[in-house]
Image (cartoon, helix red, strand yellow):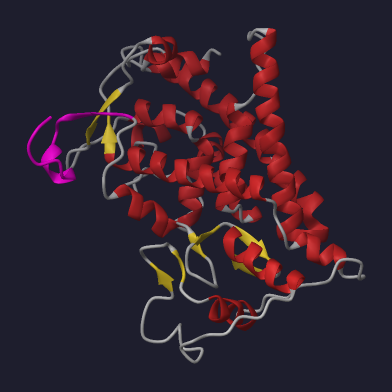
Amino acid sequence: MSGDSSPDSYNSDYLPVDLVVAEESSSVISLMERCAVCGRPAFCYNYGVLSCNACKMFFRRVEVDRITYTCKYWNKCYDGHEFVDVRKNAPRCRSCRYQRCLDVGMKYIQPGKRELELELSSRIDDEITSVIGNLLFLDSRRRHKIFNYYTSEDTTLKEMVTRSKGSRMALKKEGQVIELHEWSFLAIYASVEIAMRSLAANVDRVMTPDGKDVYPDFIMSMFSHAFLDGIRSRLVVRCMNLKVTNEEHVLLNMLFFCYPAHSLSSNAKKMISARQRVYSSALLKYCLLTYQHSGPSRFTDVLSIIHVINKQAEDVNYLTTLFQLYMPGTEYRKLFVEVCHS
């Protein structure tokens, strides 16, 4: 493709699924929480303060090695200009950086003291930080695609996996309407995602991205209101009651995708089970570090969402079967049919 490559120039041209729109990177970063010390993306609390891994390690090194730094600008590096040097992507002054750590409330506890448990609970190792950070980034990319792209292709899961070229999607056109049976696929595939979006919008039921009810009026007259309300509200209310965080959300999603199904080969089961243990361990550590003594019960509460989603999937499959009987002319996407019968 030649000529102007800005997002606006694509219009309705088809784009591959894995294409990264130039302005997407900045929008992804804006969704992340910021380090209280340097302002760069941060994913967890270290020494009692939301901070990035680099500032965590810097603060610990200064405390352990008892290093003393001197600022040549009279401790004014936070005044008048950006504290992070854009060219080096690092704080300009170590002295002011350490003082900033103290100012925002970082407290280092010497190993061996009674408070060691508290010190350990405020740390998270590099591997877990990397796992959660990478998942948050990928989730932001995926969310961008769901909101802004659409495909009219009707392929099976096997075709999507085995063909040489990935699925191709077009930018959504203004006013484009997605049919009910297409949203029903998302109700299974992205049930937690939809619940989290509803939670962020402070609504207690599943809604389409443009704020409309997922059920048209004629559906409400065909089925029990209690049954339909259960599908669109059960999972949202559960996530709302638990106040599920973005970190818990992305880790829970990976636990779903890393399920070692019986139909897989023994080698595939071993590989997927190994990845499932990684994400399960990451979720447990996140709960322990974030909620401390309540961590184990929080871990159990988050995992309980799996049972809610299983019930959700059963009800959606039942609704789909009945809908096909009432509306025999309705065509469903092949991928949706596969999911319902898997």
Q: Does 69 appear above or below 43?
A: below
Q: Where are the magenta residues, as a range?
A: 1-17
Percent from the top left, x then y, of residue 280?
71, 37
Q: Is residue 11 magenta?
A: yes
Q: Does 116 appear above or below 72?
A: above
Percent from the top left, x then y, of residue 206?
46, 44
Please name whichever residue, 318 or 175, is drawn nearer the observer in this view of the structure: 175
Query: Could you say which quadrant of the image residue 10 lies in?
Result: top left
**For residue 229, side relative to residue 210 (left or right):** right
Q: Residue at x 9, y 33 (%)?
A: 2
Q: Residue at x 54, y 48 (%)?
A: 133
Percent from the top left, x then y, of residue 26?
34, 55
Q: Is residue 55 magenta?
A: no
Please name whichever residue, 318 or 146, is drawn nearer the observer in this view of the structure: 146
Q: Does 83 appear above or below 319?
A: below
Q: Quadrant of the C terminus?
A: top right
Please name whichever residue, 85 or 282, is drawn nearer the observer in this view of the structure: 85
Please name whichever residue, 160 or 29, is drawn nearer the observer in this view of the structure: 29
| Identity of the residue furthest to the left in this view | 3
